[in-house]
Amino acid sequence: MSTTVDLVLALKNELKNARMTYADLARSLDMAESSVKRMLAKSDMPLSRVDAICRALKIDFAELARRVADAQPLLKELTHEQEKAVVKDKKLLLVAISVLSQWTLEQIVAAYRISEAECIGCLAQLDRIGIIELRPLNRYRLKLAKTFRWRPHGPVMEFFRENVVLDYYRGGFDGPAEGLLLVHGSISRSLAPAFLERLQRVAQDFAQQHQTDQKLSAKDREGYTLLLGMRNWEFELFTRLRRA
């Protein structure tokens, strides 16, 4: 959510853009000019006063709040405690993964055994945690950057290692548009980061295509999970056979 300080800073810019003086604003608010200056300098005022200034500047309070929220820095990673809160409740984890895929409330409830009230509660929790900004009619805005990732050794990845990895790899990867590639090689240390960047671009392309195809009907879409990884690693069995 936007803080009052952020809103007041935005109002100062709007005041400048409107070429309205402090004296003009003071007359509109029926306040002394000195009081208006002091109030804006502190960047701290009740929301009712922010709304009054918006009316004086002829701007919509909700639109101002939305612009301020959209300008907030996006999260690249959650804290350990935030992830712990997500993974503690399996339905909350389900909704968190769903919103990462930009599913609507209606889509989540239609696909899974979770009631509308439960889903709304989970969305409210994700708002408090900081993953989304909950908006009217149970719509939301993701507050995560495109480069967002779960903490490498955090609660969410530990959960997936323990409960999901084997389930994922148990598949034959032989269905339509499925595949599993395992490539090992020794390459220059200086070039390794470039390959990781390429993998990240593939992941972003996949996520972008997901967004684009949301306009298609459900019968024309299929759910896929793209799992990319690259690490300095050797199978432990082979490591044991290495010469000293």
Image (tube, rainbow, N blue to C red):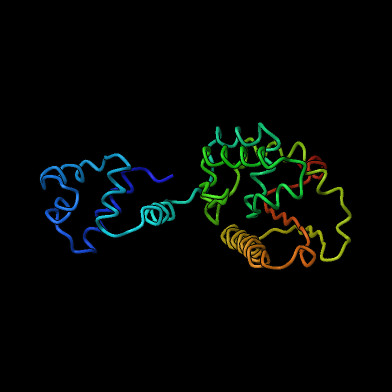
Depth check, front residue: 114 or 77: 114
Does residue 217 appear to the left or right of 131 in the view shown? right
At 40% from the left edge and 53% from the top edge, which residue is drawn? 62
Left or right: residue 172 versus residue 116 is: right
On the picture, is 91 further left or further right than 82?
right
Q: Position of residue 51 (x, y in %)?
A: 31, 48
Residue 218, by quadrant, is: bottom right
Picture residue at 85% right of the left edge, 58% below the top: 173
x%, y% of residue 71?
Answer: 41, 55
Q: How many labels sit on residues?
A: 0
Nearest to the observer: residue 63 or residue 200: 63
In the rendered image, the quadrant that contains the C terminus is top right
Viewer-nearest residue: 39 or 212: 39
Quadrant into which the N terminus falls: top left
> As displayed, is residue 18 above or below residue 161?
below
Q: Position of residue 158 (x, y in %)?
A: 68, 36
Compared to 19, does 241 lie above or below? above
- Expressed as whole percent of the image width and height from the top left, the position of residue 152 reads 62, 42
Q: Along the line of sight, which residue is nearer the eye, 183 or 167?
A: 167
